[in-house]
Amino acid sequence: MARDPGASAVRTRLAWRRTGLSAAAVALLLLRPAFAPGAGVGESLVAAAAMGGWAAMVAVALHRARDLRRRFPQPSPRTIRAYALVITALAVLSGWVVML
């Protein structure tokens, strides 16, 4: 069976898209406390940080998808580190919101 290197690039782009959508769901859940009655500055800052983290994650995903269109997919350590940092920050924010 012959390998199709183009198919792996398409699958990877789709995976980045799914990841971006799931991160959007997490960011929207992190917005919820900011709109609760009696929400303070802390909740608004968490919501802003969540939206910033989501925007950064989407920027990394778009950058990676654009790279996949131009050349054969190769792992980019810088992209992976940036993505891991953003996801970790979103996870910490999520845990903090749960503890509120």
Image (cartoon, helix red, strand yellow):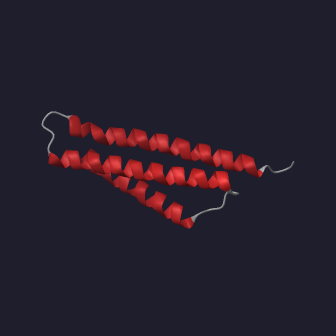
Q: Is residue 79 visible?
A: yes
Judged from this view, the residue extending furthest toward the front is: 70
Judged from this view, the residue extending furthest toward the bottom is: 77
Judged from this view, the residue extending furthest toward the right is: 1
98 relative to 69 in the view: left or right: left
Name the foreground residue: 38 vs 100: 38
Q: Residue at x 86, y 50 (%)?
A: 2
Q: Please state the horizontal and vertical placement of residue 14, each as a whole percent of the image.
A: 60, 43
Name the foreground residue: 16 vs 98: 16
Q: Residue at x 61, y 46 (%)?
A: 13
3 relative to 89 in the view: left or right: right
Name the foreground residue: 91 vs 61: 61
Counting every numbered tag in the picture gives 0
21 relative to 43 in the view: left or right: right
Q: Residue at x 33, y 38 (%)?
A: 29
Q: Is residue 94 visible?
A: no
Q: Please state the horizontal and vertical placement of residue 4, each as a whole percent of the image.
A: 79, 49
Q: Residue at x 40, y 49 (%)?
A: 55
Q: Please state the horizontal and vertical placement of residue 9, each as a whole percent of the image.
A: 68, 50
